[in-house]
Image: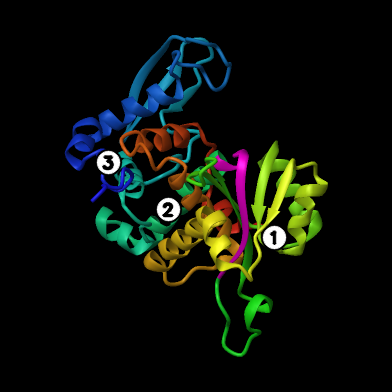
Amino acid sequence: MKMNRVQFQPGLSMHQFMDLYGTQEKCEAAVISWRWPKGYVCPSCGQAEATFSSFRRGRLLYRQCSSCHFQCSAIAGTIFEATKLPLTVWFLAMHLLTQAKTNMSMLELSRHLGVSYPSAWLMKHKLMEVMRLREDSRQLSGRVELDDGYLGGQRSGGKAGRGSENKIPFVTAVQTTESGEAELVCLAQVPFTNEAMTDFVNKSLVRPLTVVSDGLACFTVTAKAGVHERIVVSAGDPTAAYARFNAVSTAQSNLKTAISGAYHSIKFAKYAHRYLAEFQYRFNRRFNMRTIFGRLARVACGSPAMTRTFIRAAEVGC
């Protein structure tokens, strides 16, 4: 039997991870190398390759610029800013989230890390926001399969079907090879209107390309936006739909399985964009499990500080 190259690839083992990032000092050294790969740059005066003195204040390592005397901790201005948890816990969280076969809930993460559920919730949402920011500029080209989907379900006593108040619409676009094998995915929380779909096409699809979609009315804007070719897969021909629409159908199925298998209570109206971004980030880096941790950690070090208020308030309207 042919082995799946994604499922059976070697990743970053726990033993390897602990050798690289098992102490606070190793984590700090990694953060510093990722934040200032060409040498320390003072956040205050902007002097490149600035000379500095180092000292510790409590658990944190600080640097003081020799020119302006500005003091800066290694984690200031990053998503780790103001955290009460050691960097070893944050690094372990990133390792668990990137190496797990499926999504990991906040409750499971809290048990693995030995932290409270609110702390695990905040960590997970900060890291998902980092993933969202990284994937926000994702663009697809060539052959792209396009389909609509919904997150959430019917509330008791509410409307059924697409009119349900608890269903959040989103678009799935999958870039494939000419033979239909999935390469990259782009997920967007957007209402199914011509205006919203035009914005999505202009932002996320690079022309010329070939779009394969079903008959949803708003998908007609792909042709109006100057897309090279558009193929409509009819719902009345399931054989053709499976053969020419398999990548996007599989991606949507995997997304819903990942969410339903890990999470049991999600405020989709408020946080759906982050859960979509988590799946997109992991999917687009699924062929190299050895490096996905380092890539996420490096981006986290370059991301701006995020307060609890910001994380809880961030919302994408539909």
Determine the residue positioned at 54% across, 68% down.
Answer: 267
Q: Which residues are magenta?
A: 135-151
Label 1 SS = loop
Q: What's the distance in space between the residues labelled 1 and 2, CA to CA?
A: 21 Å
Earlier in the chain: of badge 3 and badge 2, it is: 3
Label 2 SS = helix
Q: Position of residue 93 (x, y in %)?
A: 33, 47
Residue labelled with disc 3? 9
Determine the residue positioned at 30% across, 56% down.
Answer: 115
Q: Amino acid at mark 2?
A: Lys
Q: Are marks 3 and 1 in contact (CB under 8 Å)?
A: no
Determine the residue positioned at 27% across, 53% down.
Answer: 113
Q: Which mark is residue 124?
A: 2
The residue closer to the viewer here, 257 or 28, is: 257
**For the C terminus, which image quadrant?**
bottom right
Q: Position of residue 207 (x, y in %)?
A: 71, 36
Label 3 SS = loop
Residue labelled with disc 1? 317
In the rendered image, the vertical position of residue 275 relative to residue 31, given as above or below: below
Q: What's the distance in space between the residues labelled 3 and 2, CA to CA?
A: 25 Å
